[in-house]
Image (spheres, rainbow, N blue to C red):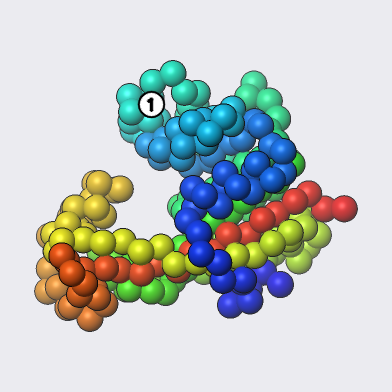
Amino acid sequence: MTDPARARQVDTDSASLLSDTFAGLGARRVLDAGCGSGDMVAHLAGLGFAATGIDPSPAAIAAARARHPGLPFALAGAQAVPPELGRFDGACLVNALHHVPPDAMLDALRHLLDRAGALLVIEPLADGGFFHAMQPVEDETVLRRLAVQAIAGLVDSGGARLVDLLRWDRISRFSDMQGFLDRLVAVDPARAAAIAAHGPAIAAAWAAHADPVPGGFRLVQPLVCWHLAPPG
């Protein structure tokens, strides 16, 4: 049941899915684990949720606080939510589980589910034009598959109940390859070294997977959301 191939195809995006699901559950206090620069926290707060963001990166938390002053952010990983933050009605991990060390993925899922009544895990699959264009810069094939396996392991062991499984395509548009590479580096500046080292392979991957459209190119990234609830 947790196999992404069996997910229900929907027409949505991560922000809409999270806000609609949390609203449907009557959730008010929500946690974004792995919040990065805090844009999802700001989106949810703008819709009336009491949203809090955590991230294990000091740079990410500093950026989130600078970008969204007045919103609550804390330096912490998904597997160690500070107890002083209390409990939440819902939590989400958006494009973040595959960045958790593999041996801590299950602990992170269990910990978040214990702190919230619902957990939405959104992960990019190791598939699609965006993924393949990025592979020469950073190949996340193994990490993304380990994340899927961690979710399946939690459900199969009875540690969580799968409420819903959804799939959609994220469409990204770029004027050219440099715009794509700039986006990758903005997410993780460490990628600049790989870009400098693998120019020909990156150009070949871009040529093979970027779809020409009016005004530039588009890349498709399949995403899946697992809606998890406590067992029972």
The quarter of the picture where residue 117 lies is top right
Residue at x 69%, y 37% (from the top left corner): 27
Residue at x 58%, y 77% (from the top left corner): 5
In the rendered image, residue 35, in percent from the top left (x then y), is placed at 46, 39
Please, what is the three-letter code of the amino acid marked with disc 1? His
| Viewer-side residue, 90 vs 27 | 27
| Viewer-side residue, 80 vs 131 | 131
Residue that mark 1 sits on: 68
Residue at the farthest right position: 232
- Badge 1 local density, few (<14 within 10 Å), some, or many (20+)? some
- In the figure, 198 relative to 80: above or below? below
Residue at x 24%, y 53% (from the top left corner): 183
112 left or right, relative to 183: right
Residue at x 53%, y 34% (from the top left corner): 47
- In the figure, 223 relative to 42: above or below? below
- In the figure, 21 relative to 151: above or below? above
In the rendered image, residue 229, in percent from the top left (x then y), is placed at 75, 51
Res 31 visible: yes
For the N terminus, which image quadrant?
A: bottom right
| Viewer-side residue, 14 vs 76 | 14
In the rendered image, residue 174, in percent from the top left (x then y), is placed at 21, 61
177 left or right, relative to 98: left
Residue at the farthest bottom position: 208
Residue at the farthest top position: 70
Residue at the farthest front position: 214
In the rendered image, residue 206, in percent from the top left (x then y), is placed at 20, 73
Q: Count of labels shown?
A: 1
Regarding mark 1 in the picture, which secondary structure is present there?
A: loop
- In the figure, 9 relative to 34: above or below? below
Res 51 visible: no
The quarter of the picture where residue 26 lies is top right
